[in-house]
């Protein structure tokens, strides 16, 4: 959900891991040209009130055994088409190139990038949304955003901090008495800040989820309390506050704190505090197994040369407040612009969110409170997050001077390390003046 289980980028990457089925589609797609489409749209005004590990990686075995859904031919992963230049603005050559690599070399069926600056937005797509019908990726596509959900969760908690309802350095026990206990886990010694910054050292429930349970019933509902209890059957990684270690359990607990303090559901609070004020019409906390509106199918590839598996339909409660939100490139860019622009948090809370801790890997990558920071190849830094949910890998980033970019690929697990690299490179190219990174 929650962040690629391959090479670290933004999101829950606690180390470098190999994904199943690396590059399995290369042989059948490398010679097929993807469809690239550019769409230029203008910025919309918004009105707001001032104020380690992935599901895909953890459940790769589940997909290998078999997930309910149609098995589709990998040879249909891309379709022949021609590139069409944008009518205005730059042609985003760097972003185009990385989308092309995703849908040829990396074997991703389809990819989308939405690039935005103060002049407007450009949408680029490549490949297909459906390997059976060969329908192109829709420019207004919705998709599961995985761990990018954590930005929404952390923002909601920080609004409650601003309102005096939550204290960052208060023990989790203050808000969830008796919940974090057992096997050395103790909510009296873990703070809210440590949850949001992944320094609680609590075990990650995804490390102990039985893949065959998901295989048996991918549409099953998962109560966050049960997932937390599953994690707490195991000892902590280390003492709270000792270094950074990504755990999705942290953000399930953050969602539970939101509900306990406000008396409303997590979905209600995110909608009232973020989605509606920003008019994010394509963003929601889902309760159903389908995706509303135009969307690419989500696929997994269980092994090398294995056919793709359509895993679009899945109960989102397995992600919850750690990774369950559905959104779009337009809405994610709007959200990041508002967040970094101070429209969602007061200066004091935004400063807390941007107080980072090194993650211990991937160069200068640093994690704040649900928000990451990384250097751009051409200088300066950007903020954002990445995410995985079964069937999708995503990433969004933004600079403080008003540039945003979101990239989506509809494959996971089953991709190579290069898929994550190319998604990140596309984001960085867009934010760095569309210069292809020399590192890629």
Image: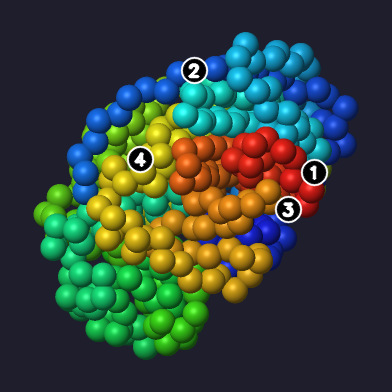
Q: Which residue is mark 2?
A: 41
Give the left or right position of residue 300, taking residue 148 as reference. Answer: right
Q: Which sits in the foreground, 36 or 76?
A: 36
Mark 2, other Cα within 10 Å: few <14 / some 14–19 / many ≥20: some
Q: Which residue is mark 4?
A: 338
Asked if disc 1 and disc 3 are in contact, CB closer than 8 Å, the reply is: no
| Disc nearer the start of the sequence (1/4) | 1
Q: Which sits in the foreground, 39 or 141?
A: 39
Q: Which sits in the foreground, 425 or 289?
A: 425
Identify which residue is drawn at 29% across, 85% down: 189
Q: Which residue is mark 3?
A: 417
Residue 319 place in picture, x, y as percent = 41, 52
Identify which residue is drawn at 51% across, 31% down: 117
Label 1 sits on a secondary structure element that is: loop
How does the figure colour the protein chain or chains? Answer: rainbow
| Disc nearer the start of the sequence (1/2) | 1
Residue 211 place in picture, x, y as percent = 54, 59
Cα separation between marks 2 and 3 = 32 Å
Mark 3, other Cα within 10 Å: few <14 / some 14–19 / many ≥20: many
Cα separation between marks 4 and 3 = 32 Å
Label 3 sits on a secondary structure element that is: helix
Cα separation between marks 2 and 4 = 18 Å
């Amino acid at each position: 959900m929650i962040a690629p289980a391959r090479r670290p980028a933004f999101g829950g990457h606690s180390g470098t891991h190999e994904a199943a089925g690396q590059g399995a589609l290369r042989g059948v797609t490398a010679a097929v040209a993807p469809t690239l489409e550019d769409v230029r749209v203008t910025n919309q005004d918004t009105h707001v009130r001032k104020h380690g590990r992935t599901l895909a990686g953890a459940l790769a075995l589940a997909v290998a055994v078999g997930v309910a859904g149609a098995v589709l031919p990998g040879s249909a992963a891309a379709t022949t088409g021609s590139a069409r230049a944008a009518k205005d603005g730059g042609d985003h050559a760097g972003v185009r190139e990385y989308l092309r690599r995703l849908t040829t070399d990396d074997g991703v069926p389809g990819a989308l990038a939405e690039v935005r600056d103060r002049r407007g937005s450009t949408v680029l797509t490549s490949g297909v949304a459906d390997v059976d019908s060969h329908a192109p990726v829709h420019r207004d596509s919705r998709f599961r955003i995985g761990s990018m959900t954590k930005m929404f969760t952390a923002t909601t908690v920080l609004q409650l901090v601003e309102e005096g309802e939550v204290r960052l350095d208060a023990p989790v026990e203050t808000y969830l008495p008796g919940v974090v206990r057992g096997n050395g886990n103790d909510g009296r010694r873990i703070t809210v800040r440590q949850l949001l910054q992944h320094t609680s050292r609590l075990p990650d429930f995804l490390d102990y989820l039985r893949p065959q349970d998901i295989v048996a019933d991918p549409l099953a509902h998962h109560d966050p309390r049960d997932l937390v209890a599953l994690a707490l059957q195991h000892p902590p990684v280390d003492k709270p506050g000792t270094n950074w270690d990504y755990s999705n359990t942290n953000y399930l607990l953050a969602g539970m704190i939101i509900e306990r303090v406000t008396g409303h559901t997590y979905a209600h609070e995110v909608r009232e505090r973020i989605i509606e004020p920003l008019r994010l019409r394509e963003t929601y906390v889902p309760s159903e197994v389908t995706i509303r509106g135009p969307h690419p199918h989500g696929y997994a590839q269980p092994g090398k040369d294995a056919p793709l598996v359509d895993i679009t339909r899945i109960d989102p409660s397995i992600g919850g407040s750690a990774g369950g939100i559905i959104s779009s490139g337009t809405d994610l860019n709007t959200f990041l612009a508002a967040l970094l622009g101070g429209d969602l948090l007061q200066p004091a809370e935004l400063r807390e969110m941007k107080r980072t801790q090194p993650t211990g890997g991937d160069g200068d990558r640093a994690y704040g409170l649900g928000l990451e920071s990384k250097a751009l190849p051409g200088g300066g830094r950007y903020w954002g997050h990445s995410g995985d949910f079964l069937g999708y890998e995503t990433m969004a980033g933004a600079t403080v001077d008003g540039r945003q970019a979101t990239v989506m690929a509809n494959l996971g697990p089953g991709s190579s390390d290069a898929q994550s690299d190319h998604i990140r490179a596309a984001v960085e190219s867009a934010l760095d003046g569309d210069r292809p990174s020399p590192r890629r």
